Image (cartoon, rainbow, N blue to C red):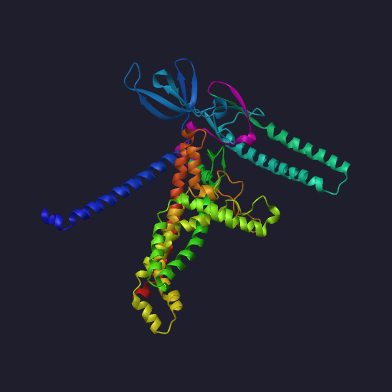
Amino acid sequence: MKHWIKSGSPWIWLTAGSVSISMISVLGILLLIGWKGLSYFWPTPLQEWHTIDGKVIVGQLYDVEKFHGKDAEHQERLIIKVGNRDIYGFDFINIDQDKIQSVSKPSALVVVDRLQHGKFFGTIIETSNGLELTRQQAESWVRSEKAKVDLLEQEQHKLYGLLDDLPNSDLSKNEKVKKESLLNQQVDSILTQLNYSYLILKDGQGTIYQLNSDNVLGIWFPNAMSLQEKIIHWLGALYDFVSENPREANSEGGVFPAIFGTILLVLLMSVIVMPLGVIAAIYLHEYAKPNMLTRLVRIAVINLAGVPSIVYGVFGLGFFVYVVGGTIDQLFYSTQLPTPTFGTPGLLWSALTLAILTLPVVIVATEEGLSRIPSSVRHGSLALGATQFETLWKIVVPMASPAIMTGLILAVARAAGEVAPLMLVGVVKLAPSLPVDNVAPYLHLDRKFMHLGYHIYDVGFQSPNVEAARPIVYATAFLLVTVIIGLNLTAIAIRNNLREKYRTLEL
């Protein structure tokens, strides 16, 4: 036993066990987040509960709780998602199992995804023209109505644009009045057409509701769908989630602006931090003399890596936004003051703040890569007549490029998940437009943006109904992890390519 302990085998098994437990924990968390998030988009069957007091409840079974009741030690309470938020004012109801008389799953029950007020659970009676929709007819009706609504809304926007330009036109006053009246009549006609097409629905209590077609996003019959149809619907819902804009205070719709903002922020941060970090590391390792000042700088760099991220956010707000941005406004945008252009939180200041936050990681990783290169390589290059700069540019930096990419991987992994500093320097709950569009200069660094991390915080803690928004939190968290893994895998692939490319320099 003593011989086995002295051999070091217990430490090997302890290390292997620790790594295994860590890997299992990480995979377990990812599986939990993925399951909770991705299952939200699955077309859950609708059920109809008939209670002993004559009520009918239509909804989806969300969870089952066990509790100690008066008559029995173990009783079950059903948590049912009833939808119809505009009617009931809430998303869930609780009902004890012993109060349920019967449960059924009628195939006629339908889920109507709406632009406002979430989903509607019930049945379709008919359309505005008296048509009773079947499953296939419902899908084609939604597509045709969407096309009509899009055309009418485009025409409506054009009319509003003409009304806005009318005061600046060369027409006389009487002609302006006549044209304004004609344009308003056309707008009213479009509004009438938008309100003319509608669905007549009935909820579980038998109450009739009218829903305009411009408020309908999708219709499906979950109880009548086959497994293949459910899979197709699930994939379509996932695509909508990653490609559409959010709505209903971020509790419905997609997260495309947040995905775009997260990736663009990380790319800008990488472009800023890599040159700064690499140049600083090269100077400290290759040029600076090993004196007290150099040692103090290295200690400061290492300590900066442990500074809380919110401190960087305060620094970014005070220095980048107010000092640098305010100076830019005074010099170049004085005609627009007091409305700030760059003297307000935005994408550029967020990228710079994250670059300062991750700079120590890049410097330390680059210095470690430079220290692993033998001095004989440098001496050989200098002996052949190369200057120190040529030696660094053509020999040392290429050999250290895998370590530099390792620093970038660590920087991306930390920056992509940061939220606290971004809340002070640019991220918002809902951005009216993307930082990139087809208007010059195309990349608008002064605009505010959305971020997946902040989206998780907003939906999980600021939503009016946290329980209903919880699946969105899981789905967004899983998507954020996926984005970070994708960015890291891209950097790892580049690092491996560089390692193979410059392997011959190590021989």
Q: Which stretch did the figure color magenta?
A: 204-233
Q: How many marks?
A: 0
Is 227 inside the magenta-drawn segment?
yes
Where residue 146 sits, quadrant-wise, is: top right
Asked if residue 72 can be seen in this view, the reply is yes
**Horizontal arrangement in the rendering, residue 64 relative to residue 82 (left or right):** left
In the image, residue 460 sits, relative to residue 275, either above or below, namely above
Which is nearer the eye, 96 or 101? 96
Is 324 inside the magenta-drawn segment?
no
- For the point 69% across and 53% down, which residue is it? 336
Which is nearer the eye, 391 or 240? 391
What x and y, as percent, mark residue 483?
46, 51
- For the point 42% across and 39% down, which residue is it? 36
What x and y, as percent, mark residue 45?
46, 31
In the image, residue 65 sits, relative to residue 167, either above or below, namely above
What x and y, as percent, mark residue 118?
55, 33
**Horizontal arrangement in the rendering, residue 193 relative to residue 28 (left or right):** right
In the image, residue 60 sits, relative to residue 152, either above or below, namely above
Which is nearer the eye, 206 or 158? 158
**Horizontal arrangement in the rendering, residue 342 relative to residue 49 (left or right):** right
What x and y, as percent, mark residue 20?
28, 50
| Figure quadrant of the C terminus | bottom left
Asked if residue 232 can be seen in this view, the reply is no
